[in-house]
Image: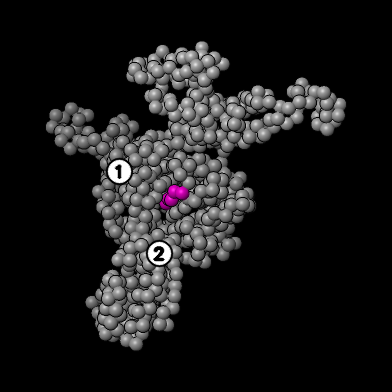
Amino acid sequence: MKKLTPDSPEAKSLDLIGANIAKLKALFPELLTEGKDGAAVNVDVLMQLVGDATATDTDEKYGLTWNGKRKARLEALKPSTGTLRPAKDDSVEWDSTQNLVIEGDNLEVLKLLQKSYANQVKLIYIDPPYNTGKDFVYPDDYQDNLRNYKERQGTLGVEQNAETSGRYHTDWLNMLYPRLIIAKTILHPEGLMIIHMDEHEQANAEKLLAEIFGEDCVLGVAVWDKRNPKGDATGLAYQHESVLFVAKDADKLAVAGGLSRRKKNADAILSKAAKLFSRIGKEDLPADLKEVAKDYKLARECTSEFIRPIGLAEVNEEFESWIKAQNFSGGEEAYSMIDENGEVYQSVSMAWPNKKQAPEDYFIPLKHPVTKEDCPVPARGWRNPPATMEKLLVAGEILFGSDHTTQPRRKYLLKKNMNEILPSVLSYGGSDDALLKEMGIPFEHPKPVGFARELITTIKGNDAVVVDFFAGSGTTGHAVMAQNATDGGTRRYFLVQLDEPLNSEKKEQKVAAEFCDKLGKPRTIAELTKERLRRAAKKVKAENPLFHGDLGFRVFKLDTSNLKAWDPNTNTVREDLLSVAEHVKPDRSNDDLLYELLLKKGLDLAVPMEQKTIAGQVVHAIGGGVMLACLADAIDTKVAEPLALGIAEWHKQLAPANDKETVVVFKDSAFDSNVAKSNLTEILKQRGLEKVNSI
């Protein structure tokens, strides 16, 4: 039974405008566009449809446009006035971890990360809200986005964006556009962005990426075959989603290794081959007696005359049978041979692959190592030039027949070809609902960790910084930890998640809200993210007890700056002047200040820190001495000189790589007089510390 409310269509008078728009849409769908206030009629198109010759195409141009695009672009360029405040109590292994979890609006957070991580992130892996009419759209306010976020904090619920909305695509594009612009700035020149997308906005997303990164940098769209078609579909029963790949610089990414993935079963193949190869020379029963004599000891006593050492040929026979029995891809199945050194390989033609004939020197014959006679040359020549052929010969990577009448072939070793080019169809069925249930985390439709691990490894190297600014349940962080435990990597993850509230009155959020209550935490999705990561770390450690990598994370929370802004009220100017004499907000700690200084300076939020007491004051050395901060509340003339001398001496001991860039910071309000401030500054400058700042 449907409950009627004052907002229900049935409780309102007839919507004539809505009815007219619906009729136009049915007859002429090309007439409908999106204006700033919702659905609108494209008058130029209407004029063309009725044959009006006055319609012109002077404003037509190729590209994706929508209402609000210019403002969205300007918002990406506007600097943030916020900061990230450390939350050590929420963190795991704060002092040693290099991973970050940041709560807050990712638009502001990305802006704040630009200085510290410009051109450093090798992989951005995101799963933004799908525009299904049910997922929330981030409520940006381009007048003052940070203030809007702070004012709405605690009420940032799901924003319905139904397909009947006149701004259905517009709102989603305005949400994603500025975030992608900023995300590009933190990508490494060899970096890659991977974006999950469903059918609702894939076409728009591709155009958006082509505009921001350039068409040449959009590497393609892979189909994620989920092997489970939607049962409630009214059109096609989609059983796939799309995964978009875009490079910061396609040429540099190609040079660095391009898009590839580890062959799924390569490790299993090598492991099986090693076990079989280890049996060579050891006593064994013939295959026809193995089934009869299950007990090896009994077999030895009863059939001693049949026991003999196993040879390479028999090992290869068993290895090939095992390969054929597996459900491997054709590329993996081809690696079905083991050589005399225990290496797994396949035999590949060395013929020139193109229809056009190879250069003349590609026809030089190879001599058979035994007969010393020339072997046959492929009709169109060899695949490789003479210099490469010589290297292959020296490396033992050319296979010859029993005599010179057989054409030589290339020996491809599996250990040198553990990766393959990423295909356009990625098959991965199943979900992680059972996994999260086992971990006790109530979260619907999480990305599968296994699939995330596959995508994470498409970027070459195992030391990348991986950023996900739509963190959700924290799958990306879980995947990074699990993959590091598998291959010994040192990847770092930076996750950003909006502290979106959970409402216990909503059926789909009730369990998650009550879960947060049991934890004694606020009812937000960000709390689910953090708790999932805590439990994932324990799970990874339990499954990999020998792994001693990073399983912690530092938590930061988006907030307004720790420093007071000059915002006087005409009725209280005197009071405002007195209050602004203390530049730091009263509810902020020295730790808050330190991390805002890191952001302003462009330092890593996980940079090492030391502290030392000098002249009775605590001094912090950040990044091995690239920044020295004394945030004492009181520095008088007596303390100024010994404090300055002590700081200069410590800086000398730390010996940072570029000491001329070292910044020394104090609280401006700490000095009891200008004399104390001047003396301290001069002493530091005389000792090479030119950059002395106060806040």
Quick check: is 464 in the magenta stretch?
Answer: yes
Residue 68 picture location, percent across and down: 27, 48
The spot of residue 367 in percent (x, y) is: 47, 18
Please state the horizontal and vertical placement of residue 519, each as a whole percent of the image. Answer: 58, 62
Q: Amino acid at mark 1?
A: Ile
Residue at image coords 33%, 19%: 359
Q: Nearer the viewer, mark 1 or mark 2?
A: 2
Specify start and end residues of the magenta stretch as a single range: 463-470
Q: Amino acid at mark 2?
A: Gly
- Mark 1 burial class by Cα count in 10 Å: few <14, some 14-19, many 20+: some
Q: Is the residue 633 above or below the residue 34 in the image?
A: below
Report the disc number at residue 623: 2
Q: Which label sits on residue 648?
A: none
Circle on res. 212? 1
Residue at the image point whose x is 36% and y is 44% from the top: 190
Q: Quadrant of residue 665?
A: bottom left
Residue found at the very far left of the displayed protein: 54
Return the residue nearer the eye: 625 or 340.
Answer: 340
Q: Position of residue 511 (x, y in %)?
A: 57, 54
Locate residue 497 relative to residue 71 in the image: left or right: right
CA distance separating discs 1 and 2: 34 Å
Q: Secondary structure at mark 1?
A: helix
Tag 1 near tag 2, CB within 8 Å: no
